[in-house]
Every structure is written in C-alpha cells, then in structure tokens.
C-alpha cells in the first residue's frame, strides 16, 4: 500500500485500489484495459457501481485490445509546478507488445473527488489483436437486442460506470466558449435514469442526485467545449440504460504514429450530499485544488487598450508612457500591452499583410520588440510601470503551425521577458488546436514557463474564437479572457456580461474569469435611446459587476472623461483592499438571473465566518429586493453588515438588513449597486 496523508493506492492480484478518507475507486485489470469494480462515497458508505456488471472503463481509437505484458505502479507527491494543491499522483502503466498505456490518478488529501487521465504511446507496429474483451457479467437490463458489447462497439470513450442507484436524477451542464459568436454560455438538461433509455448529452458536467437519500455523484469531463473538442463524433455523455459512458478522448488512430505519449481528455469523479449547494461546493474545491488561490499573485485589476478598437495603431513608447500614470491613478495594477509591441505583423494589425500563426516562417525576429515603436525596447515602459507600482503585461500568440512545433522557442521568448522586464502576465491569443500533439505541446509550453518562473507567470487564455482549451482543458496556469465586446459594434451591453458571469460562476471559479468593463461613454450614438445602453448604465455599474471576478479595463484609460475617471478611481480604491478576500471566497450568484431589468448579485462565502455581497439593481421600478443567501442553512446567527462602496447615483446610504439567511436591500435608483462585508 502506497500512502500520502490520507491518500492511498495499491495494486494486488490484478486489482488497483485508489482513494482517501472521502472517496475510493477500485479497478480490475483485464488485458490492457481496466474494469471498474467499485466507486464508494466513504463518508456515507454509498456504493455507486452495480455489482456483477463488468464494464470496460475506456476504449481508445488507437489502442487495440491485447494482453498486458507488464503492469507497474508508482506514486509521487506533486503540486503541478507549484500552482496546484499538494496531492498524490499515482501512475499505473500497462505495457503490451505494441503500446504503453498509463493511467494517472490524482488524489487530494481529504477531498471528495479524484482526477484521472490516460496516456497512450505506441512502441511498435500494430499487432493483429483488436476488439474488446468479453464481459464477465451482465447487468440484467434489456435494451431490446442491444448488448453490452454493442454499447461499446464503434465508440471512443474515456470512462464508463455501471450505476447502481435506480432512483437518481441527473443534470448535464453545457458550457460554451467561442464567445465572439456565442452569448448564451450555459445550458442545462435534466432527466431521470431509466433502464431502457439511450441518451446522448453534450456538456462538461454531469451530476446525479439520489431521490431517496442525500447522495450525489459528479462526473466532470476535463476537456474543451464542443467547439474545441478534437475528433468529435458525438456527445460527451452517453446513457445505455444505467450504464454511463464518457465519450470522446480527443485522440485519433493516427495520432501517435511517431511514438509520442499522448493524453486523452481527463475525467474527475466526485461525491457530495446531493444538494445544489453541495455540488457547487465540490466544484469550488476542485477549482481551488488544481489552482490554489494566491492573493498576491492572482488578485489584480488589469487594463488593456484593445477595447477602444485602435488595435495596434497607437501602440508605441510615447502612448504607453502616457497611459501608465492614468492607469496608476485609477488603481490599475497590471497594464497589458496588446498586439503591436512586436516586430512581426499579425492579421489583426492596422497594417495590411499580417498573418495568424506560422510566424517563424515570416521572420525569426517576429517576437522581437518593434524597433520603431519601441526604439529603446520595453525597458523604459517597464521601468515607468515599476515606478508607478504597476506591473507590465504582454499579449502573445503561440505559433500554432505544425502542431505547435516551435513551443520551446515560444516558451523561451516568454521566459526571457520575465527575466529581463519582470513581465508575469501574458495573454495567449490566436491559438488554433488541430491535434492532440498540438494540444500537448501548447500544454508543455505553459508548463515550461511556469516551471522556469517558479509559478510566477500567469496566462490569460483567450476563449473567444477558433479551437481552444475551453474551461476545463488544462487552464490551471492562469485565468480565462472570456469575451471581446465593443461599443463600436454595439455588442457590448453590461447586462450581457453580467449574465455570463452570473451563469458561469457556479461551475467555473469566478476569480478564474476575466470580466471586462469598457469606457461606457464611447459611441453613444450607436445605441440611440436604449435604456440599457452602456452610457445609461454608467461606469460605476459597469465596473461593479466585475468585482467578484477578475476585473479587466478593456479601454484606453487616457480616453476616459474626467468625471467617469473620478468615479472609477474612487470605486476601485474602495474595492482593492477587499479584492483578495472576495476572490479568495466561494463566489456564487444570488437574486434573479440578469436580463437588464433584474435585481441580482453575488455572494462570496469565506471559511472564516465572514463574506461579501454585491447587490445590483438593473433597470426596473422596484426600490427594494430580498435575496436568499447560500450556506446559512436557515441558522440565525448574529450578523453585522458593513457597507464598503455604493453607487454615487444614490442620494442616501442604501438600506440593508441581513437575518435568517436572507438579505433585504433598498436602492432608490436603477443601475445602482452596493458592496457589503458581513461578519458573524
């Protein structure tokens, strides 16, 4: 038995046992595949796997069935290059004459979930062995003439569970990215398990809650959304009666012709109490395990000039030196220079003839600082930023060509900027994934930079277009740049952005999401007399809706009107002393779903008996609202509310009362807000 704190792993007589004090999973090895024998919630003793049904745990398109020639197991302490919580990484290798398969299981002390990922490497030409092993047992379910072997045949899947509980409700959560083209980012499908039903679902999260007991099971697919899924042939989850398959490895039969060890998409399995709050707590624990929150590193207010649509036309030393003092005055902590600082020209440039990817075939000096725009290099602007107490950030586009063949060169470029200018924030854009090898190399690039900088560099991964990593596809090395919106094109409405954050925050840590606010006074004529126009909403409200996420000033800060600048400055300076505590808590939506006319908001729950609330009154004629809060379970406790900030539109101090897990607030004008800290 291999042990680390309460985590353990063992391999004996063909059985692999992994777990901790909260969860345990047991597999049996059949040839070069695994069969799940048990999945137990150790807190309650609940067994989730039907006994007597042997269901092959995976079927990969490039892995023929064969007898394993050698099985080995090893375990090491790991923390994912310092960005994750310390945990126990268990690796089980099954070798045949043609392939090496490695199952990697990550166990976190006292956590109610485990993560698993399979790696495949071809070590010789394919043998004649193929197909799947014959099952040792039957579930007794009848899907007409549909056998268990047929349920597997022709499918590519990364996990399979024969579920025991009969009376279970499921919900499937689909998240969308490619936000240049999508603005409804979350959808949910629900149903009941039925022994004769075949169902195919698209999503990242599948959660079960038993109807006769307080029990729940989470199955999370660690991969991109449907828009970034490689070699996609169907959905993500498939029911054949009570048999669940997690479909789609992202691998193709030809992927490892050169003998590369390639990962399939991963799966996280977790147990919880079957309640909606329990599911959200489990997902929060998952996110905070794969990337621990470090306030000094992760809490910042960033600005980026691209939102004013000058593109790279104004990017030069003189302009940046003018912007930096204005950013510092507002309270911005990271100033990011977007596309245009480099010598090479991309397709986004105001200069014709640019390219996306294949940069090194254009010039081996593509990522050298532009000699005319920055004749003294970046050192003067970096020095000025440091003098003002601001960090400098950069936009960067990893070269997608030839499956990211130049990943090491790209990594060295970023490491160089960190070592010379101290740059820690890089926006990654222009990414187009085409294969598992490319995905692996992009991952290796981020890992190399993370390791070389002791985890100090953070990547802002753009999710707006093309084929990207999504929300759960190895995005732990920073946060997510969620959306491009512009007043120039009339596609920026603050309530759209608010709704996206409100809907995503139960499933993706809010601190992981960069949420933008724009210069709301620009392009007023594009919105006519619309009462929900950015200028009608106002700069304070536009910023307030970002406070429980990672705020991004998507603008040229020197372009702000003086009055708006003063309002924004006051609000940011009131917010910043609390930013780490807000982001360090568990952020969940409260109130009504935003639609432009709601009462809505967010709650940040701290483990130390304190928390934060922001309430936002959109365009409506209701001066008062009540909010049910999370995590109080109806227990009446002494509570004190402290007002941190509120809209300058309000003539009076907002009225608020908190008792018995409910908040009552009065705001006397539309498009206003109040930020509170509460203490037990």
Image (spheres, rainbow, N blue to C red):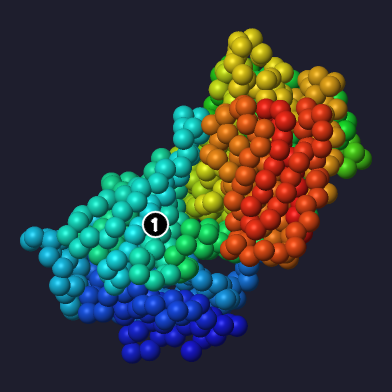
Q: Quadrant of residue 313?
A: top right
Q: Residue 614 at x, y = what percent?
A: 69, 44
Q: Quadrant of residue 263?
A: bottom left
Q: Is residue 508 left or right of residue 149?
A: right
> Which residue is drawn at the image coordinates 57% and 18% (left, top)?
490
Tell how many labels.
1
Q: Is residue 171 left or right of residue 447?
A: left
> Which residue is drawn at the image coordinates 56% and 61% (left, top)?
281
Is 628 located above or below residue 104 in the figure?
Answer: above
Q: Is residue 289 left or right of residue 638?
A: left
Q: Residue 645 at x, y = what percent?
A: 80, 40
Q: Kindly tell me whether residue 205 is visible in this rendering.
A: yes
Is 210 located above or below residue 616 in the figure?
Answer: below
Q: Kindly tell me whether residue 518 is visible in this rendering.
A: no
Name the residue furthest left: 145
Quadrant showing the C terminus: bottom right
> Which residue is drawn at the image coordinates 88% and 42% (left, top)?
389
Label 1 CA crowd tier, 10 Å (few <14, some 14–19, many 20+): many
Comparing 643 with 284, the one in front is 643
Q: Residue 203 at x, y = what percent?
A: 39, 49
Secondary structure of the residue carrying tag 1 is strand
Which residue is tagged 1? 206
Comparing 620 with 542, the one in front is 620
Q: Residue 516 at x, y = what percent?
A: 65, 34
> Which residue is drawn at the image coordinates 26% and 58% (left, top)?
239
Comparing 496 with 513, the one in front is 496
């Amino acid at each position: 038995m291999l042990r680390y704190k309460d985590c353990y792993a063992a391999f004996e007589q063909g059985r692999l046992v992994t777990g901790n004090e909260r969860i345990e999973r047991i597999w049996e090895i059949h040839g070069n595949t695994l069969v799940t024998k048990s999945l137990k919630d150790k807190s309650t003793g609940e067994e989730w796997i039907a006994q007597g049904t042997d269901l092959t745990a995976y079927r990969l398109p490039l892995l023929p069935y064969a007898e394993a020639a050698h099985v080995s197991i090893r375990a090491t302490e790991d923390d994912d290059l310092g960005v994750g919580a310390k945990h126990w990484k268990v690796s089980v290798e099954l070798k045949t004459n043609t392939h090496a398969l490695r199952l990697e299981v990550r166990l976190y002390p006292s956590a109610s979930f485990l993560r698993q990922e399979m790696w495949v490497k071809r070590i010789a030409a394919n043998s004649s062995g193929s197909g799947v092993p014959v099952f040792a047992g039957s579930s007794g379910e009848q899907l007409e003439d549909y056998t268990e072997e047929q349920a597997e045949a022709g499918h590519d899947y990364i996990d399979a569970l024969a579920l025991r509980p009969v009376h279970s409700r499921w919900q499937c959560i689909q998240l969308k990215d490619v936000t240049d083209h999508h603005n409804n980012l979350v959808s949910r499908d629900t149903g009941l398990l039925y022994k004769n039903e075949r169902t195919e679902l698209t999503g990242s999260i599948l959660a079960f809650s038993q109807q006769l007991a307080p029990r729940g099971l989470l199955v999370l697919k660690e991969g991109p959304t449907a828009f970034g899924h490689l070699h996609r042939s169907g959905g993500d989850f498939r029911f054949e009666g009570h048999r669940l398959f997690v479909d789609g490895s992202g691998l193709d039969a030809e992927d490892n012709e050169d003998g590369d060890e390639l990962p399939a998409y991963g799966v996280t399995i977790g147990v919880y109490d079957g309640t909606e709050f329990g599911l959200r707590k489990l997902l929060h624990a998952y996110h905070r395990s794969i990337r621990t929150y470090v306030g000094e590193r992760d809490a910042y207010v960033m600005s980026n000039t691209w939102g004013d649509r000058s593109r790279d036309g104004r990017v030069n030393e003189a302009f940046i030196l003018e912007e930096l003092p204005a950013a510092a005055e507002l309270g911005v902590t990271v100033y990011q220079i977007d596309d245009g600082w480099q010598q090479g020209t991309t397709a986004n440039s105001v200069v014709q003839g640019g390219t996306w990817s294949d940069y090194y075939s254009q010039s081996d000096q593509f990522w050298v600082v532009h000699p005319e725009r920055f004749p003294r290099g970046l050192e003067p602007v970096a020095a000025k930023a440091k003098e003002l107490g601001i960090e400098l950030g950069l936009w960067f586009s990893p070269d997608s060509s030839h499956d990211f063949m130049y990943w090491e060169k790209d990594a060295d470029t970023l490491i160089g900027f960190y070592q010379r200018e101290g740059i820690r924030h890089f926006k990654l854009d222009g990414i187009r994934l085409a294969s598992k090898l490319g995905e692996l190399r992009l991952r290796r690039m981020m890992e190399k930079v993370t390791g070389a900088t002791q985890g100090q560099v953070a990547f802002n991964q753009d999710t707006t277009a093309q084929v990207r990593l999504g929300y759960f596809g190895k995005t732990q090395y920073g946060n997510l740049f969620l959306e491009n919106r512009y007043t120039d094109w009339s596609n920026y409405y603050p309530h759209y952005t608010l709704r996206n954050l409100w809907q995503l925050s139960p499933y993706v840590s809010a601190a992981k999401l960069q949420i933008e606010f724009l210069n709301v006074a620009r392009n007023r004529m594009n919105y006519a007399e619309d009462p929900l126009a950015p200028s009608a909403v106002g700069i304070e409200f536009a910023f307030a809706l970002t406070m429980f996420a990672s705020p991004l000033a998507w603008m040229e800060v020197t372009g702000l009107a003086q009055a708006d600048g003063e309002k924004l400055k006051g609000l940011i300076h009131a917010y910043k002393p609390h930013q780490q505590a807000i982001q360090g808590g568990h952020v969940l939506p409260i109130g009504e779903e935003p639609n432009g006319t709601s009462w809505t908001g967010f709650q940040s729950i701290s483990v130390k008996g304190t928390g934060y609330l922001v309430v936002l009154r959109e365009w409506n004629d209701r001066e008062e609202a009540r909010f049910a809060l999370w995590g109080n379970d109806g227990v009446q406790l002494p509570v004190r509310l402290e007002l941190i900030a509120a809209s300058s539109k309000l003539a009076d101090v907002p009225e608020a009362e908190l008792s018995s897990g409910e908040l009552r607030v009065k705001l006397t004008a539309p498009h206003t807000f109040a930020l509170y800290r509460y203490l037990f």
